[in-house]
RNA sequence: GGGUAUAUAGCUCAACGGUUAGAGCGCUUGAUUCACAUUCAAGAGGUUGAAGGUUCGAAUCCUUCUAUGCCCACCA
């Protein structure tokens, strides 16, 4: 890349954009261009050229909402997806990571309307009308979309831009209409007056999932209703109450029979009331009696349905009282409530008031204003009805996908990580009601239903009798395109945004028009999402895919937690603690950001994100940079002006590894190779089990502790020709292993060591079990321990670092082995002027003593301070303690009898070692 | 009310029934022409939230409790 030596510190901004461009231009983001492997029986995987079929691996990006810009949560998702995609790609899979965005119906329209209102437009819908307002929203969405796509690129995400999708584009609209029509024809979609959540501010229906409950302290009124006392927090809904409900087994009300009628005085005069008996009533609560308001309460509506009762609208769609409220007509609920209470009191109907009653109020999560249950004509998906061709309901399909597997096929099972979320998912399914899919907003897929004549909406109707007939249209057409003929009017409503999101895994693959991509990449291989959209999204994808394609949408779902700030608070714009990923990238680089968001995370658990974490990650990136820098400089045989690429052409950097199996390796060489082989095997297992954080941690330990702190230090002394080859071999391997986590710096370095191909499509390292056995790590471990012991003894005794001392080691059986590493030990910053190695010997007076197992070390020429005495005494005490504990354990017959032999032996060996150490320590 | 998760060093997290409970950050002491101060060496710091139980052996399994977070629910 450059003809200069590498800078001392890695500066991400100098490389990232160019690298991303290079990846894009390579075409390898598109699986069709990838060199792939075909697994062959018995002989390992075979590399084949592009165009041939490889094993597909597909991930559909959860499409970010076009309501703004990406936040840290998206950074986490992009990191997770891209880590997986890059890993699989390097494993020879035909990887598709498909990018996209979501039009986020209610959220986006609400956002744009809010902006317009802030700009002084009182009622954007009235002022602009449907088409003009849609145009404004579209413009906003497009701008937001383009920002988001740029951010995804900045994250280094290796997605196939040629397949970019949008939940609201033409191809996705076609999919939506097709599925809607299919469901309608299967009788799964119906239109009906049902109780729904009405957001008066947004003037639309919202789903149960879009509601947030807030606790409020309100007065709780006890009212006299005929012979009964009823309690309510909402007297303003009670004008039309004419049914009084109690539990059938409640002894107190035995004399009242179901269907009994009586007259009583009520808010606005006499009413005729009917007694209803229903088991839903809790006799323990209050008086055990309540009146019902079917139009404005979910439970009351259900009771009314069960007993075929009528209801009446009390509150209009703007949250104001209707004429039934008499003199309170036109008042807002909260304004009317105390006034109604006053009137009741004046009439002697108010028994008592409990102040500060804790009441839960429904609020819209987008509008944050109160949500009133209302009865409206809506479109629903029936989740309980049997699907004609399947003899199962949608609920069954959703359930079976995570329990027995779709169609009882274990291969068609969605596996959720962590497993516990399967439980909550199933619980949610069990309590699922019909899905209200219509919304009274404009930004969204318009319901593909056409009427020949437009009906009117009634404010009043009898639920029991008029349900089927109310608002019936003369003629109806449901289909993917406009019907022929004159006079057709399309339904005004749009679809719940999750209807289109539910199709995401296959609408993105061109369904229903194209079949080839679908066949290759569906079901998708892996999906990741936050637990907060498990029900919104995962459930609906499973529903849509099993119903439409007879396939599960994905094999594995990885649930990640939420990123929180240092104090454990959610990041949010409103609380002003938002962190812009682009700012983090500008300061620390994308690799550092990616590493910091996945560090320390466990599936399904929240994690904390803070500056020190990114700094740590940045340091790790820089460490890797300098490891490479050292290897490039030191494995360099020519003059300093020589370019990296020139060095390659001189033939130095040829593929290493083939000649690493002979006996010319040193103890340190064997050790590092052993560690590398273990690392490769463990990282593989981590990936297979989605343990991203653990894999990165393992790589950090190897790179920083084993390689940089030990092996590179050794290599400064052991300057064998083989060393260069080895260093090159190790570097190549760790660049590959790190690549999914920090794609930019590894790709830069890959080029710096003269590789012509992109690291992105290099082959993932394979752990070779035989090699790992061949490379003994034990010999060098002893050397390490001796070095640490000497450094430690010096530091504890405050021996000046510059002061050279003589050391004597009594090495016992390991004499020859340690003898061979004498000069290495001296070179590893032990500050030794001389090193004598004996099998055994006398205690040396006035020397510092240290021990490594049975090996004794004496440092001469340093003052044996008082500190040394204290240190040794402390060590002695500790040694005695552990020996005692081990002795007790080993004399316990139960332990020696019941514990596995290997454990007992290990324990015995350990005790023996300690005892020798103790003996030596006493002697010294 | 039901469910679920978490509780380990000052902070963030490991340790997945095997015995002196480990890292990173922070802290303390020291180093400095060497690939890296985005560095290096060394150190201090823990009755594993509490109490019982199972086991030869428990941070780990069981029970109860406490604290905190999240999800669900029809207390009118």
Image (spheres, coloured by chain):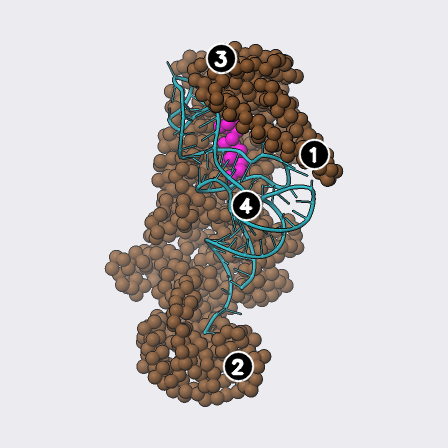
A163 or B62: nearer the viewer: B62
Q: Which mark is residue A276?
A: 2
Badge 1 marks a residue whose secondary structure is helix
**Image marks 2 and 4: residues in contact by CB distance under 8 Å:** no
What's the residue at 43%, 83% (across, down)?
A224
Same chain letter for marks 2 and 4: yes
Crowding at label 3, few (<14), some or many (≥20) Cα neighbours within 10 Å? some
Same chain letter for marks 3 and 1: yes
Q: Chain of mark 3?
A: A
* Disc with the residue nearer the chain's start (3 vs 1): 3
Compared across the picture, whether A616 is left or right of A51 comes to left
What's the residue at 55%, 21% (across, down)?
A850
Q: Which residue is mark 4?
A: A526
Badge 4 marks a residue whose secondary structure is strand
Badge 3 marks a residue whose secondary structure is loop
Q: Which residues are magenta?
A: A693-706
* Disc with the residue nearer the chain's start (4 vs 3): 4
Q: Which mark is residue A218?
A: none
**Image marks 4 and 3: residues in contact by CB distance under 8 Å:** no
Q: Please name which of the two marks, 2 or 3, marks the residue nearer to the observer.
A: 3
Prevailing secondary structure class for the magenta stretch in the rendered image: helix
Q: Please name which of the two marks, 4 or 3, marks the residue nearer to the observer.
A: 3
Crowding at label 4, few (<14), some or many (≥20) Cα neighbours within 10 Å? many
Identify the colour of chain A in the image. brown
Compared across the picture, whether A773 is left or right of A234 comes to right
Question: Magenta span has A698?
Answer: yes
A272 or A401: nearer the viewer: A272
A352 or A556: nearer the viewer: A352
């Amino acid at each position: 890349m450059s003809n200069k030596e590498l800078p001392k510190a890695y500066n991400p901004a100098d490389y990232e954009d160019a690298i991303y461009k290079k990846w894009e231009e390579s075409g390898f983001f598109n699986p069709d261009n990838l060199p792939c492997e075909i697994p062959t029986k018995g002989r390992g995987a075979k590399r084949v050229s592009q165009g041939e079929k490889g094993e597909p691996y597909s991930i559909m990006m959860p499409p970010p909402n076009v309501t703004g810009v990406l936040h840290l949560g998206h950074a986490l998702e992009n990191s997770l997806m891209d880590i997986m995609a890059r890993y699989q790609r390097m494993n020879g899979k035909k990887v598709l990571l498909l990018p996209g965005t979501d039009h986020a119906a209610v959220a986006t329209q609400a956002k744009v309307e809010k902006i317009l209102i802030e700009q002084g437009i009182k009622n954007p819908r009235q002022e602009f009308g449907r088409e003009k307002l849609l145009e404004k929203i579209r413009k906003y969405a497009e701008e937001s979309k383009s920002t988001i796509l740029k951010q995804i690129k900045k994250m280094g995400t290796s997605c196939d831009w040629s397949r970019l999708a949008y939940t609201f584009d033409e191809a996705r609209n076609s999919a939506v209409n097709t599925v809607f029509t299919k469901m309608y024809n299967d009788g799964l979609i119906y239109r009906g007056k049902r109780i729904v959540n009405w957001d008066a501010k947004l003037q639309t229906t919202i789903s149960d999932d879009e509601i947030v409950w807030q606790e409020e302290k309100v007065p709780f009124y006890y009212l006299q209703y005929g012979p009964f006392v009823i309690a309510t927090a909402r007297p303003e809904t009670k004008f039309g109450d004419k049914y009084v409900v109690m539990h059938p087994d409640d002894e107190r009300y035995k004399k009242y029979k179901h269907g009994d009628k009586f007259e009583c005085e009520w808010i606005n005069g006499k009413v005729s009331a009917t007694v209803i008996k229903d088991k839903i009533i809790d006799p323990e609560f209050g008086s055990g009696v309540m009146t019902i308001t079917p139009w404005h309460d979910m439970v009351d509506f259900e009771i009314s349905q069960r007993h075929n009762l009528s209801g009446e609208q009390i509150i209009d769609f703007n949250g104001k009282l209707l004429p039934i409220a008499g003199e309170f007509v036109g008042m807002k609920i909260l304004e009317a409530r105390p006034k109604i209470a006053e009137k009741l009191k004046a009439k002697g109907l108010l028994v008592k008031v409990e102040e500060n009653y804790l009441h839960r109020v429904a609020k819209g999560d987008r509008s944050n204003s109160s949500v009133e249950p209302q009865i409206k004509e809506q479109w629903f998906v029936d989740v309980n009805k049997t699907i004609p061709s399947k003899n199962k309901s949608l609920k069954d399909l959703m359930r079976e996908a995570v329990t027995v597997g779709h169609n009882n096929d274990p291969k068609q099972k969605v596996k959720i990580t962590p497993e516990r979320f399967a439980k909550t998912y199933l619980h949610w399914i069990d309590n699922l009601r019909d899905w209200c899919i219509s919304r009274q907003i404009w930004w969204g897929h318009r319901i593909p239903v056409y009427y020949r004549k437009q009906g009117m909406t009634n404010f009043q109707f009898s639920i029991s009798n008029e349900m089927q007939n109310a608002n019936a249209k003369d003629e109806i057409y449901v289909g993917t395109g406009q019907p022929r003929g004159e006079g057709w009017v399309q339904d005004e409503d749009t679809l719940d945004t999750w209807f289109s999101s539910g199709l995401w895994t296959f609408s993105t693959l061109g369904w229903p028009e194209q079949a080839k991509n679908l066949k290759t990449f569906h079901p998708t291989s892996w999906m990741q999402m936050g637990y907060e959209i498990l029900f919104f999204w995962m459930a609906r994808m499973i529903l849509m895919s099993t119903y439409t394609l007879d396939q599960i949408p994905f094999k594995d779902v990885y649930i990640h937690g939420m990123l929180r700030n240092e104090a454990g608070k959610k990041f949010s714009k409103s609380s002003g603690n938002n962190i812009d990923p682009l700012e983090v990238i500008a300061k620390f680089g994308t690799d550092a950001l990616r590493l910091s968001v996945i560090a320390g995370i466990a599936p399904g658990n929240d994690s904390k994100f803070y500056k020190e974490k990114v700094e740590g990650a940045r340091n790790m990136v820089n460490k890797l940079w300098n490891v490479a820098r050292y290897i490039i400089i030191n494995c360099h045989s020519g003059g300093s002006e020589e370019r990296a690429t020139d060095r390659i052409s001189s033939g130095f950097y040829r593929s290493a590894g083939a000649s690493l199996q002979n006996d010319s390796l040193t103890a340190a060489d064997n050790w590092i190779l052993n560690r590398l082989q273990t690392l490769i095997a463990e990282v593989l297992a981590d990936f297979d089990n989605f343990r991203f954080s653990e894999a990165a941690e393992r790589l950090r330990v190897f790179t920083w502790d084993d390689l940089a702190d030990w092996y590179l230090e050794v290599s400064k002394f052991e300057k064998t020709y083989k060393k260069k080859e080895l260093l090159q071999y190790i570097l190549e391997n760790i660049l590959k292993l790190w690549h999914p986590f920090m794609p930019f710096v590894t790709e830069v370095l890959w080029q710096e060591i003269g590789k012509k191909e992109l690291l992105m499509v290099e082959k993932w390292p394979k752990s070779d079990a035989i090699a790992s056995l061949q490379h003994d790590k034990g010999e060098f471990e002893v050397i390490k321990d001796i070095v640490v012991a000497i450094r430690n003894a010096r530091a504890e005794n405050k021996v000046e670092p510059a002061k050279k001392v003589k050391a004597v080691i009594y090495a016992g059986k390991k004499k020859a082995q340690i003898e061979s590493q004498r000069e290495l030990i001296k070179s590893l910053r032990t500050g030794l002027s001389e090193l004598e190695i004996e099998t055994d010997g006398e205690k040396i007076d006035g020397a510092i003593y240290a021990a490594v197992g049975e090996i004794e070390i004496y440092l001469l020429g340093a003052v044996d301070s008082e500190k040394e005495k204290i240190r040794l005494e402390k060590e002695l005490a500790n040694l005695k303690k552990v020996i005692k504990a081990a002795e007790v354990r080993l004399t316990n017959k139960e332990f020696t009898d019941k514990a596995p032999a290997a454990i007992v032996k290990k324990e015995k060996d350990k005790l023996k070692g300690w005892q020798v150490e103790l003996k030596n320590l006493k002697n010294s």
